[in-house]
């Protein structure tokens, strides 16, 4: 008796409408999979017009730099940039920094500018940031993101680190959230190469 009810339940579950709907969904997924590129495809030159533009508040705001001067991202217009949001207290940021230092050494000669913007208060974290820069031998620009700059870049995702690869024409080529030791470095390199080639 119990087996008969289970069979009847299965028969009722797969109604003709559910069966057709399932087949349509599977066909759409298959079509999407066939049309997408795999990670082994070589990047081609693509138009940047579909990439989001870096907001003016991010480019034009003067921010305090760890060296005592000011950082303004629009001063790097015409160059590929990697902008990294981080903090001294953030464990993944500490793990990511040696990789960013290594990438900076590799890409600076090719005209890529790196800017690390702490999301901490510049007054209370000044010494911590100076110590961080020395400890990790950071040789790229370090400063503090203003609240407006951080909010505009983060777009409601407040976790850090966040890295942004910005093209020469001021568009966000790639946004990378968090840090994973195996996945993040190749993603950063691929995005930098793509930005340099566009």
Image (cartoon, rainbow, N blue to C red):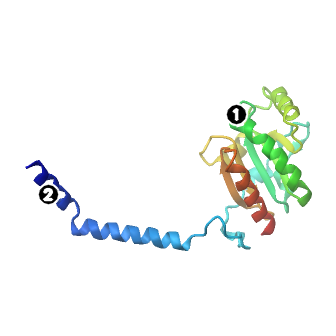
| Residue nearest the viewer, comparing 8 with 91 | 8
Q: Are marks 2 and 1 in contact (CB under 8 Å)?
A: no
Q: Is residue 21 left or right of residue 168?
A: left
Q: Which residue is mark 2?
A: 8
| Residue nearest the viewer, comparing 56 with 150 | 150
Query: Quadrant of the rendered structure where residue 12 is?
Result: bottom left
User: What residue sits 27% from the left and 65% below the top?
Assistant: 18
**Which structural element holds mark 2?**
helix
Q: Residues within 10 Å of mark 2 (few under 14, many from 20)?
A: few
Query: Quadrant of the rendered structure where residue 194 is?
Result: bottom right
User: What residue sits 72% from the left and 73% below the top?
Assistant: 44
Lower position in the chain sequence, tag 2 or tag 1: 2
Q: Which residue is mark 1?
A: 90
Find the distance from the CA under tag 2 to the CA under tag 1.
56 Å
Q: Residues within 10 Å of mark 1 (few under 14, many from 20)?
A: few
x, y (%) of residue 30? 46, 70
Q: Is residue 110 left or right of residue 59?
A: right
Q: Nearer the viewer, mark 2 or mark 1?
A: 2
Query: Quadrant of the rendered structure where residue 173 is?
Result: bottom right
x, y (%) of residue 33? 51, 69
x, y (%) of residue 99? 79, 45
């Amino acid at each position: 008796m119990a087996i008969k009810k289970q069979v009847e339940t299965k028969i009722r579950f797969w109604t003709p409408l559910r069966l057709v709907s399932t087949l349509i969904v599977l066909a759409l997924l298959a079509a999407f999979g066939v049309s997408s590129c795999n990670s082994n495809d070589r990047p081609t030159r693509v138009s940047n017009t579909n990439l989001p533009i870096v907001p003016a508040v991010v480019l034009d705001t003067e921010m305090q730099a760890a060296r005592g001067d000011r950082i303004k991202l629009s001063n790097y217009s015409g160059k590929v940039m990697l902008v990294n949001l981080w903090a001294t207290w953030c464990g993944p940021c500490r793990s990511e920094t040696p990789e960013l230092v290594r990438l900076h050494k590799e890409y600076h000669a090719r005209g890529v500018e790196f800017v690390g913007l702490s999301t901490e208060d510049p007054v209370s974290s000044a010494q911590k940031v100076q110590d961080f820069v020395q400890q990790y031998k950071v040789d790229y620009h370090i400063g503090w993101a203003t609240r407006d700059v951080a909010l505009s870049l983060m777009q409601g995702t407040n976790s850090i680190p966040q890295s942004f690869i910005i093209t020469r024409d001021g568009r966000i080529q790639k946004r990378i959230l968090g840090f994973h030791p195996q996945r993040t470095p190749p993603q950063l390199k691929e995005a930098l190469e793509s930005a340099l080639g566009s």
